[in-house]
Image: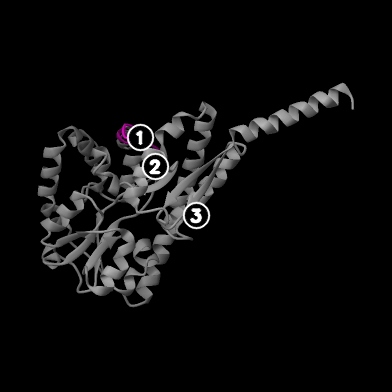
Amino acid sequence: MTFTKSVLGGIAVSALVATAAFAEEWKGWNIHVEGYPNTVAMDKFGELLAEKTNGEITLQMFHGGVLGSQPDAIEQVRAGALAIGNFNLGPMGPTIPETNVVSLPFVFKDVDHMHRAMDGEAGQKISDGMAAKGLIALAWYDSGARSFYNSKKPINTPADVQGMKVRVMNNDLYSGMIQELGGNPSPMAFAEVYQSLKTGVVDGAENNWPSYESTGHFEVAGYYSLSEHLIIPECVCINADVYNALTPEQQTAVKEAAMESATLQRELWATRETESRDKVMATGVKFNEIADKTPFQEAMKPVYETYLAANPDIAPLVELIQSLQ
């Protein structure tokens, strides 16, 4: 073997050793089922992550909430037990005040308004609040607009919610929303909703079309009333310590991979939303669009007042979102 070949061979071996030394496998959490837009996008994120870091970082995703409930998983990522999570911002509210802004009913005019806010200054302020609590937001995913569904009757006015037991995510804002409509909020884990609807533990719930369809909730709650009262984005989040330990090049690669996965997720979401709506409508679900949302919006004033009284520093962020054209 010549000296040149020997040196080149040594360099190649050293490179392989260096790559192996820096190789790291992250674990990621996602609540959604196989085939769901978020699941497909998070798997794509993993592929892009390995590609853009030349195999230095890989991601093993655990879908379907198999590693615990969403609130538990949020804390696992904050603590570093998990590196990555795809979370709805709703359950973050009790821990991260800035994220609670997107949980205010009707704070967004529509989904496009939400995208403009989250991709701009408002989204950055929310990201800053998350970073202070140990989470770095890499990208924003879509989760459409949430509406009411139940097993009893169409909802057209707040009076129709009177006395109804409605499942909500574990956040005081959602409980307050149902209470102001005269209903009885029932916070519970997402995985428990189907059986609770089936057995009458709750009368109804609220969610988007894909979640209503993919979980089979339409089988046990056949009335879907389009209120679009909540438009809550989701994030691809990483543990702050894990992210800060990366080289600048790796940080760029991680962000690029997450952003590209978000572009895919939003495209898939738009398609899936239509497909899910068409699928459940074909089964005979009784659908109605609430013609006048003003009474619902007016009923939310005490929710805003209570929230802002307890979080006066967040008022400018609420105003920023509401003033965005």
Of badges 3 and 1, the one in the foreground is 1
Q: Secondary structure at mark 1?
A: loop
User: Of the residues shown, which amino acid type is indicated by label 1?
Assistant: Gly
Residue that mark 1 sits on: 134
Does dot 2 land on a helix, a strand or a loop?
Answer: helix
Whether the magenta-drawn stretch holds residue 243 is answered as: no
Q: Is residue 96 above or below residue 70?
A: above
Q: Picture coordinates of residue 68 (x, y %)?
A: 38, 53
The residue shown at (14%, 65%) is: 161
Report crowding for label 1: few under 14, some 14 to 19, many 20 or more residues within 10 A (C-alpha): some
Q: CA distance from mark 2 to mark 3?
A: 21 Å
Mark 3 neighbour class, 10 Å CA radius: few under 14, some 14 to 19, many 20 or more: some
- State the separation of the CA atoms marked 3 and 1: 26 Å
Answer whether labels 3 and 1 touch (C-beta < 8 Å): no
Image height of 81 relative to 244, above or below: below
Q: Which residue is mark 3?
A: 40
In percent of the image, x 60 and y 41: which residue is there?
51
- Amino acid type, mark 2: Val
Secondary structure category for the residue under label 3: helix
Tag of residue 321: none
Residue 305 percent location from the top left of the image:
11, 43
Q: Magenta part of the protein: which range?
A: 129-139
Front disc: 2 or 3: 2
Query: Where is mark 2, residue-wise?
Result: 77
Q: Residue furthest right?
A: 1
- Report x, y in % for residue 86: 41, 48
Query: In the rendered structure, which amino acid carries the disc numbered 3?
Result: Val
Q: Between residue 50 and residue 105, name the one nearer to us.
A: 50
Q: Please provide percent x and percent y for residue 178.
A: 16, 58
Please report contact status of discs 2 and 1: CB closer than 8 Å, yes or no. Answer: yes
